[in-house]
Image (cartoon, grey):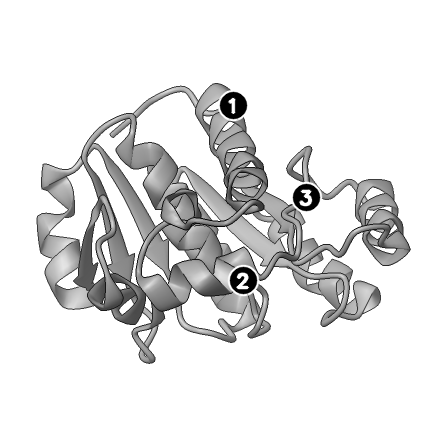
């Protein structure tokens, strides 16, 4: 399985999503996270502690990818809209994380319309959703109305994700009462990918 995580906006939990999707797939087979972000956010996360999967930069990762069953790519913040189409065509699935708080729905729909006309290998993951958040429901309804594929469940906005990044571990390794809730959300997304896409690499 070859999965890319990208968006043309920053601050949308791109690295958090890449790390936790990689953590899920590592349970299914050897997984590589390629850190294509010039800021090296995923690499910094990994250096702080111990992640269960291998992390490499773009140059290393593209060479070693053939040795792994699953490859997750964390792209740079603010990918160009035209580049999203190229990214989607080159992988099994493009995950586009988005948040109801930071994105204008019309702009997001315009961005995703570029993908819609070129490929069906993408899915939007709504993240950083506060409890009792009506904006997330409105965003979901607007995207569904425009025929944009969505993950069934949202990712909640929880402080435990920040703790996981600070400790350099997946959220399930953090000692926190909300850790399991946080992991369940990403595990659900992982299962949806696994059950919806047939072949591993």
Q: Residues within 10 Å of mark 3 (few under 14, many from 20)?
A: many
Q: Position of residue 7 (x, y in %)?
A: 55, 64
Contact (Cβ within 8 Å) of mark 3 with mark 1: no
Q: Residues within 10 Å of mark 2 (few under 14, many from 20)?
A: many
Examine the rendered structure and indicate whether residue 54 appears above or below residue 111.
Answer: above
Q: Residue at x 76, y 59 (%)?
A: 109
Farthest residue toward the bottom? 39
Q: Residue at x 25, y 57 (%)?
A: 34
State the separation of the CA atoms marked 3 and 2. Answer: 12 Å
Q: Which residue is mark 3?
A: 154
Q: Is residue 58 left or right of residue 139?
A: left
State the separation of the CA atoms marked 2 and 1. Answer: 22 Å
| Image quarter in which the C terminus is found | top left
Examine the rendered structure and indicate whether residue 32 appears above or below residue 7.
Answer: above
Q: Earlier in the sequence, mark 3 or mark 1?
A: 3
Q: Position of residue 168 (x, y in %)?
A: 30, 61
Q: Secondary structure at mark 3?
A: loop
Report the disc number at residue 13. Answer: 2
Q: Secondary structure at mark 1?
A: helix
Q: Residue at x 49, y 71 (%)?
A: 79
Q: Secondary structure at mark 2?
A: loop
Q: Nearer the viewer, residue 89 or 129?
A: 129
Contact (Cβ within 8 Å) of mark 3 with mark 2: no
Q: Residue at x 53, y 67 (%)?
A: 82
Q: Which residue is mark 1?
A: 196
Of the residues tagged 3 and 1, which is closer to the observer?
Answer: 3
């Amino acid at each position: 399985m070859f999965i890319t995580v990208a968006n043309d906006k920053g601050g949308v939990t791109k690295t958090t999503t890449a790390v936790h999707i990689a953590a899920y797939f590592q349970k299914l087979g050897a997984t590589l996270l390629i850190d294509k972000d010039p800021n090296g956010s995923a690499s910094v996360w990994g250096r702080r502690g111990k992640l269960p999967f291998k992390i490499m930069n773009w140059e290393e990762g593209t060479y070693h990818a053939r040795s792994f069953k699953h490859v997750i790519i964390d792209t740079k913040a603010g990918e160009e809209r035209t580049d999203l189409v190229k990214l989607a065509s080159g992988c099994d699935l493009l995950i586009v994380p988005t948040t109801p708080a930071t994105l204008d729905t019309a702009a997001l729909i315009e961005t995703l319309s570029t993908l819609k006309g070129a490929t069906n290998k993408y899915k939007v993951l709504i993240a950083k959703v506060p409890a009792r958040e009506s904006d997330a429901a409105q965003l979901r309804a607007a995207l569904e109305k425009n025929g944009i594929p969505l993950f069934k469940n949202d990712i909640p906005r929880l402080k435990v994700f920040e703790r996981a990044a600070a400790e350099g571990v997946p959220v399930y390794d953090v000692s926190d009462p909300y850790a399991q809730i946080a992991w369940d959300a990403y595990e659900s997304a992982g299962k949806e990918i696994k059950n919806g896409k047939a072949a591993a690499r």
